[in-house]
Amino acid sequence: MQINHGEKAVLLRNNVRILGSAGPVLLYAHGFGCNQTMWDRITPAFRETHQQVLFDYVGSGKSDLSAFDPSRYSHLKGYAQDVLEVCDALGLKSGVTFIGHSVSCNVGILASIARPGLFERMILVGPNPCFINDPPSYFGGFEKEDLEGLLELMEQNYIGWANYLAPVVSAQGDSGTITVELSDSFCSTDPITTKVFARTTFFSDNRADLPKVDCPSLIIQHQTDTLAPLSVGEYVHRHLAGSSLRVLEVQGHCAHMSEPALVVDCIREYLGTSD
């Protein structure tokens, strides 16, 4: 595959990493405040069977921070454009399995709508199309005032915000392995871009986009998850045509990090592969 200058720029911008050279493509998209290394417990299971593509959104991980545009990334469509541009740079036009975590589930949904046929299927880990409660029919897990307070804490004490949010996400307590990994990731991310991503993540409402998706999907739901309650996974399942729902006996929001073997089993079963 020959890559021109513009395509190479995209691959460098998003710190694209490719594992393997043959087989169906798995495209991994990380969650808010994270980076592509959060998938490192999953990718070894598919090295022999798939070509795996990992990347960092602009503003995250080892992406090119100079490419960050606050206007573009004030909407999840900006992050979906990252996904599409990475696919274009790699010449991926169809047959891709998109694997997204948390807010990247919404990003994948938007990308699939913008580019029908690109994704053969999606695997959504801990999706939440709207984090804000909308009673009486929808409870995303948070009141708007709670999220505003979280963003205010980011402004006043960024490190304190990271240390507060990490154990909430991991459900492992302050000293848990995943808590420490998440906190380190939060703290190593540029505060300016993270604040934009935080507001975009927590105040987006993608519920109306669910019925527009035309590819099948697997929803991997955590049994106890502050950021994506069980009722949210069930809501996504009801409104996403062709979806399957798997509820894992896992606490926290990051089963791909805390219980990777369970997630690998779900993915293998869904893809129809085996050991």
Image (cartoon, rainbow, N blue to C red):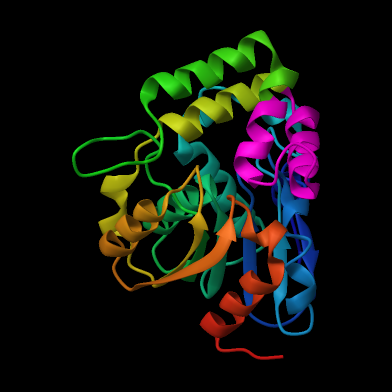
Q: Which residues are magenta?
A: 162-190
Residue 100 point in image, percent of width and height: 56, 57
Rendering quarter of residue 153? top right
Residue shown at 30% from the left, 56% from the top: 235
Residue 247 point in image, percent of width and height: 47, 67
Residue shown at 73% from the left, 67% from the top: 42
The answer to whether 4 appears left or right of 271 in the picture is: right
Nearest to the observer: residue 260 or residue 174: 174
Q: Is residue 68 above or below residue 7?
A: above
Determine the main secondary structure of the stretch shown in magenta. Answer: helix
Nearest to the observer: residue 137 or residue 82: 137
The answer to whether 248 appears left or right of 229 in the picture is: right
Residue shown at 46% from the left, 18% from the top: 148
Q: Residue furthest top?
A: 156
Q: Is residue 135 above or below residue 84?
A: above
Residue shown at 51% from the left, 45% from the top: 103
Nearest to the observer: residue 212 or residue 273: 273
Q: Quadrant of the C terminus?
A: bottom right
Residue 13 point in image, percent of width and height: 74, 41
